[in-house]
Image (cartoon, helix red, strand yellow):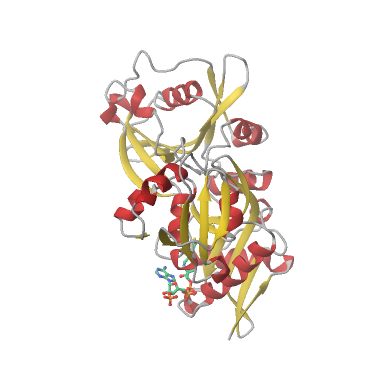
Amino acid sequence: MIEVRALAEAEFRASHDLFRRALLLPPVKDEDWPRGSGRYELGRVHGAFDGGELAGTAMATTNELAVPGGRVPAGAVTGVGVRADRTRRRVLRGLMRAQLDDVRQRGEPVAMLHASEATIYERFGYGVASRHRKVELERARVVFREDAPRGGEVRVLDWEAAEPLLPEIYQRCGIDRPGQIGRDKAWWSGMRQYLGDGCLIAVHTGEDGVDDGFAVYEPKRGELAVLDVHDMKTADATAAAQLWRFLLGVDLVDRVVGHVRPLDDPLEWWLTDRRRCAVTEVEDDLWVRLVDVLAALRARTFGAAEPVVVEVRDEFLPDNAGCYRIGPDGVERSTAEPQLGLDVATLGALYLGDQLMSALVAAGRVEVRDPAAIADADRLFATLETPWCGTGF
Ligand SMILES: CC(C)(COP(=O)(O)OP(=O)(O)OC[C@H]1O[C@@H](n2cnc3c(N)ncnc32)[C@H](O)[C@@H]1OP(=O)(O)O)[C@@H](O)C(=O)NCCC(=O)NCCS
């Protein structure tokens, strides 16, 4: 019999070590625990017990998600792991049940996560709400176009000097784009520990003297000298172009790799030969679960079109099941005949504008009862900006 409950503070480290073991990592060292422990919130860390022993764990942190036209309170789910000798006994299912019930009780309409594997979370109602890409560039062959944006200065800092500056710069870097989430001090501290002292931070200062972008990068010397760009945020195109120019100008480096970049990163538009910017991976970025479908839909704005009535199926949180009338003036529960039908995970893929209804119809993920509603749904859900999270948690 599996019993799930919120863990006491004294149990957080055991939860953390179980999670690390599940990810095939060694337990945390004493000296590293204080940096990693800051994000553990009392009441939001769950443990599943089998015969009195901790068999699995999952946690969430309190955050916000930028959605089209606004922000919504969101539980950021992380630290999910089950002991290797207790897997496939529904431990995760028990944890997800307790966690989503808790998210709902806290009044957070949305839960979100990054998934270790794409096969795990759809059954609990999560859908891929944004995607990211990886780019790789052979440094010697990259030439910037004359008309690429240029301006300001780049300086290089270590973690010690950069950590106090980064939260404020991050705030300046377009956190209203759908998919963006908050990064508090505990997040930065945990990220510093996770990425390690091999990293350097390039900070861009604009012509006005204000820091408006940064890149956390890690040079590695092996057979090839590779510069991994783990995290980069900028307030505008000039800061982005100048940071890429800097990163692609570091002596001795053979290859520059940009991880978790937005799909619409303009880098290739700034190069004389756009093929030098090779997109080597496009993957799921943020998974979103509409925990309270009505409140979550009401938190975002919709484009100009005729309203559509959509029937939502939700096996894991059946209160959400039913019809919703979605229009530019708002969203209501509806008793009208549905025009389109989908499950809650598919709605998650539409939520931030990553997918259009017509694409999901083509994929066979939507039941169409009134074909005229597809084009209206496309106009309602479409967003100007490509959603992107780019914040690991
Ligand atoms: C992923 C993990 C948490 C699953 O835990 P679990 O207790 O074995 O999962 P459950 O037994 O509750 O499984 C629930 C359902 O998910 C399925 N499932 C679970 N893990 C899966 C996986 N990795 N791939 C495919 N399906 C999976 C189960 O088959 C089951 O399906 P069903 O409801 O149709 O029967 C566990 O395998 C683990 O700790 N993995 C390593 C760490 C990790 O990847 N953590 C996630 C970080 S985002």
**Between 367 and 42, the one nearer to me in the picture:** 367
**Quick check: 106 above or below 275?**
below
Q: Is residue 76 visible?
A: no
Q: Residue at x 54, y 30 (%)?
A: 214
**Quick check: 2 above or below 64?**
below
Image check: 236 left or right of 254? right
**Quick check: 123 above or below 166?**
below
The answer to which quarter of the image holds residue 257 is top left
Q: Position of residue 248 (x, y in %)?
A: 39, 26
**Between 69 and 86, the one nearer to me in the picture:** 69
Q: Residue at x 62, y 71 (%)?
A: 98
Q: Position of residue 200 (x, y in %)?
A: 53, 34
Mark count: 0
Q: Residue at x 46, y 39 (%)?
A: 383
Ligand 1 is in which quadrant of the figure? bottom left
**Quick check: 147 above or below 48?**
above
Q: Residue at x 40, y 23 (%)?
A: 249
The answer to which quarter of the image holds residue 382 is top left
State the residue lying farthest toward the front.
336
Q: Position of residue 68 (x, y in %)?
A: 54, 41
**Between 117 and 245, the one nearer to me in the picture:** 117
Q: Position of residue 188 (x, y in %)?
A: 62, 43
**Between 210 and 70, the one nearer to me in the picture:** 70
Q: Quadrant of the N terminus?
A: bottom right
Q: Is residue 305 visible?
A: yes
